[in-house]
Amino acid sequence: RIKASGLKLQLCTNETQATRESFVRKLRAMGFDVSVAEVTAPAPAACRLLKERGLRPHLLVHDDLVAEFAEVDKTNPNCVVLGDAAENFTYENLNEAFRLLIGMEKPILISLGKGRYYKETDGLKLDVGAYMKALEYACDVQAEVVGKPAKRFFESALAELGVPPEQAIMIGDDIENDVGGAQQCGMRALQVRTGKYRPSDENHPKVKPDAYVNNLAEAVDIILQQL
Amino acid sequence: RIKASGLKLQLCTNETQATRESFVRKLRAMGFDVSVAEVTAPAPAACRLLKERGLRPHLLVHDDLVAEFAEVDKTNPNCVVLGDAAENFTYENLNEAFRLLIGMEKPILISLGKGRYYKETDGLKLDVGAYMKALEYACDVQAEVVGKPAKRFFESALAELGVPPEQAIMIGDDIENDVGGAQQCGMRALQVRTGKYRPSDENHPKVKPDAYVNNLAEAVDIILQQL
């Protein structure tokens, strides 16, 4: 409905357990007409950053994400890229990433998000942010976070759309990563009362959405009414 | 030599990969005449704390440490005790400890130390502090640290000796955990220029030892000369 109305659409996800291709395949199977070019995700953003700065990563990421880094030189690593590696977060892999970092003159840790935890069908899981904190503490460094809520991440989504922030609206369920991040970038932001949303979000000490909507369909209704 | 002179001696270790029994066995094999009662270690300190506060721990510790918690009720846990679990730091075990914590009304995380990393024959390893930071971040709690440099830990060593802090001297190689911790407690502290010692410790922004010694034998010489 958004696309049919002539508005531009970009999906901003912090998904790092799969390539954009597989993410889009899942959405298409649900009936959403989206393409890979309409998805802004942390791994491609990290690839651009690596290329710009001549960095060669050691990857501690999910097996299904590795393909996003196919074009990147990974020999003789001079930084570590951390994603939600899930089963790949083994004691051995964490020590390996740590040893590489601590051996660098100036350790560079790039983290594909900083989520605390998430829910899967078999229960809550520690997210990439927890492992990022472990490595930050051990190496006494601060990670560079790619993905929401990084300003740069929203800016690259806006660049894809070719619109300035004041002409864009973010819709999301995460008060800090979606709403706070987009507002920091000069966009307006709606919070949907679904998914990660908790009633306590409405008393958040720092972030206040421009409006609440009960769900994504209602957000679309409201946006299309303004045209 | 210290004990033969009539001075009292207590060993303060942050070792959490083995029971005091096995720690003492190792020292005796090296020719040091010490007993289990002369060792202050984090696990027994944690046991006292658990008992005092009616806490029943879920243990995420090294297999060889579990025996220290034999007397503690571990059914229906209402806190998590974290040690240097080494190979037990699996993705599954970390998620399990996290789920227990996040499910508590007020999560209680007790950490047997907060070291960043340590060296073993096969290389550097992440220490308990890194995993503590991961769980702290994911659950938005602050761990209670048992072991050096906690004031309470040095106080319990002094209680074992039956002397006030101003009559005790700490000898250690770790500028923050040994020297800083003991001084915070009102003791004097010598730093040995062996082990963990690094020349940069002598410019530490916050901690200044009462004196430096080249090694443990020299520390003993100097102390015995004062008698």
Image (cartoon, coloured by chain):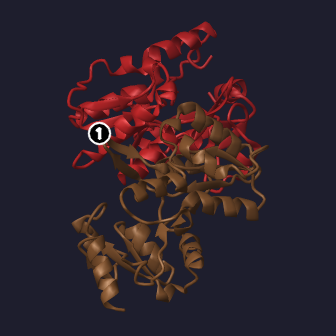
Chain colours: A red, B brown
In the rendered view, does B30 fall on the left or right side of A178?
Answer: left
Quarter of the rendering containing residue A65: top left
How packed is label 1: few (under 14 Cα within 10 Å), some, or many (20 or more)? some
Task: Note whether residue B200 is visible.
Answer: yes
Above or below, comparing residue A16 to residue B60 in the picture? above
Amino acid type shown at disc 1: Leu
* Front one among A186 and B96: B96
In the rendered view, does A149 fall on the left or right side of A173?
Answer: left
Q: Quadrant of the N terminus of chain B?
A: bottom left
Tally of numbered tags: 1
In the rendered view, does A181 fall on the left or right side of A29?
Answer: left
Above or below, comparing residue A107 to residue A205 in the picture? above
Q: Residue at x 49, y 66 (%)?
A: B148
Q: Residue at x 35, y 35 (%)?
A: A96
> Could you tell me residue B69's position as x and y percent?
66, 51
Name the residue that disc number 1 marks. A100
Identify the secondary structure beneath mark 1. Answer: helix
> Could you tell me residue A63's position as x and y percent?
43, 19
Q: Quadrant of the C terminus of chain B?
A: bottom left
> Could you tell me residue A61's position as x and y percent?
42, 27
